[in-house]
Amino acid sequence: MNLAEWLARTARVAPDAPALLAGEAVVADYREFARRAATIGSALSRGHGIQPGDRVALFMSNRTQYLEALYGAWFAGAGVVPINAKLHPKEAAFITEDAEAAVVFLSDDVGDALRPIMPACVREVISADSPAFERLYTAEPMSAPVLRGLSDLAWLFYTSGTTGKPKGVVMTTANLHAMTFAYFVDVDPVAREDAILYAAPMSHGAGLYNFMHVLRAARHVAPESGGFDPAEILGLSQRLRNVSMFAAPTMVRRLVDHAKDTGSDGDGIKTIVYGGGPMYVADIEEAVSVMGPRFVQIYGQGESPMTITALSRALVADRSHPRWRERLGSVGMAQSCALVRTADEEGRTLPPDEPGEILVAGAQVMGGYWRNPEATAKTIRDGWLWTGDVGSLDVDGFLTLRDRSKDVIISGGSNIYPREVEEALLQHPDVHEASVIGRPHPEWGEEVVAFVVMREGAALDREALDRLCVDSIARFKRPKAYLQCDALPKNNYGKVLKGELREWLAKGERST
């Protein structure tokens, strides 16, 4: 089934419901949203030769036209290739060429630098800021979306490429169906009066959450800033009401800091779904204390988008269970569409509380890597997705992430998981951020090194941090060096770049 059918159905039953908003201004109701998508689909098909299965890329900052282009491409039966607007133009060009995109939608603020290096496969470039985009609205609209099958490509997502060239993750219609339905069961209900705010890149998790809100005829809000601005988010939420959003943990941290500074309690925000990286216990405890029970955690990856586990609003806010803190430090339980287990290197299931690689199966797992059968065979074995993440499941089914397998520190033959050291350090009131890596040691193999960002005006106190670690974790796990830095290096999605930290170490930078 074509995903655009969801928009077409909603437009029939709720044509006058406000759909697309630029800030507080309503740009289109559902009748107009669907009409625009149908005209764009028609223009792509009849005017630009897009056939079912062709790829249409989007290299745009967050805006309402993003959703129009997405659904227009689906109306025509194409697979979409959303590209993070924060990528370098050369990275965007690589993705466009690898996907063999025939048409590229871009916005001038990020796309102008891509034009001179546009791959030869691209037949047409359409700017959302040009009259050419608005002319698409004048095409004769398609009467219905092109029929597509459950196994057909719908969304081609490219990994961040931290270990080499990014790979294209094939998300089929069935994958996105499973993700969408699991949201209603495991994450949050959606009602017509709700609004989804796109403060994180629409090319990734934030954009994937459009489906649930289209199905319920809810509002889609592109902030005027085009991105994440805590003051703007809190102000919009107060005025729009019932606002939900997806945010990386670093974004949650900034939002909570701003709320504290301004005396806000997050009024108007319904739900903040956080994921995409570790949310430390100290940070989420403070978030709930400042803004109340508005938070839901999800764990997923591009190969199983947003759909491995979830920690519900009630569990995030719970302080009554005897193991509430352990649960808060977890990423929750398997979502309804997923099977989750931990395994050793041979794929044997491990007992409760024993760390191993996290394996996932279910209808939400990707169709494979784009034209890369070798990588697909390495990652999906016997129907199980090998995530590359290390974690442990307790007897109740709560999954606690340890680290990426490549980030585990092995010192004296013992595994040390950086996250547990980072959790200990973040208990100190003056530690704003911390990231732990291993460095070579002639006797022990590796030793623990902590990069620490202190709160403004605070000085790093090695002895105090040592005491905190000794009180919280085994002595051999405590850092042998604390390196203060002004900020941790992060990628476009807010994840700490531990590879860059290792480069700092190799160059002797940020030493104390």
Image (tube, rainbow, N blue to C red):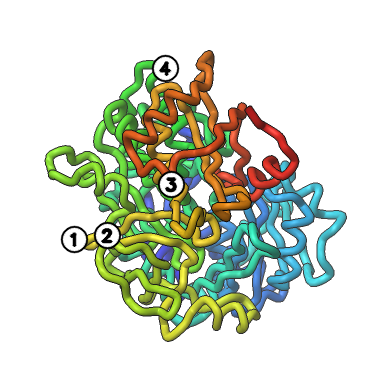
Give the Cα distance between marks 1 and 3: 22 Å
Residues under numbered marks 1 and 2 in contact, where contact means CB atoms less than 8 Å apart: yes
Give the Cα distance between marks 1 and 4: 38 Å
- Mark 4 vs 2, N-terminal side: 4
Which is in the foreground here, disc 1 or disc 2?
1
- Mark 3 vs 2, N-terminal side: 2
**Which numbered tag is attached to residue 333?**
2
**Which numbered tag is attached to residue 261?**
4
Residue shown at 72%/57% (left/top)?
A: 92
Could one spot residue 495 in this view of the protein?
no
Q: Position of residue 72 (x, y in %)?
A: 57, 64
Which is in the foreground here, disc 4 or disc 2?
2
Quarter in which the C terminus is drawn = top right
Residues under numbered marks 1 and 3 in contact, where contact means CB atoms less than 8 Å apart: no
Secondary structure of the residue carrying numbered label 3: helix
- Mark 4 vs 3, N-terminal side: 4
Give the Cα distance between marks 1 and 2: 8 Å
Residue shown at 60%/42% (left/top)?
A: 490
**Which numbered tag is attached to residue 396?**
1
**Which numbered tag is attached to residue 419?**
3
Which is in the foreground here, disc 4 or disc 3?
3
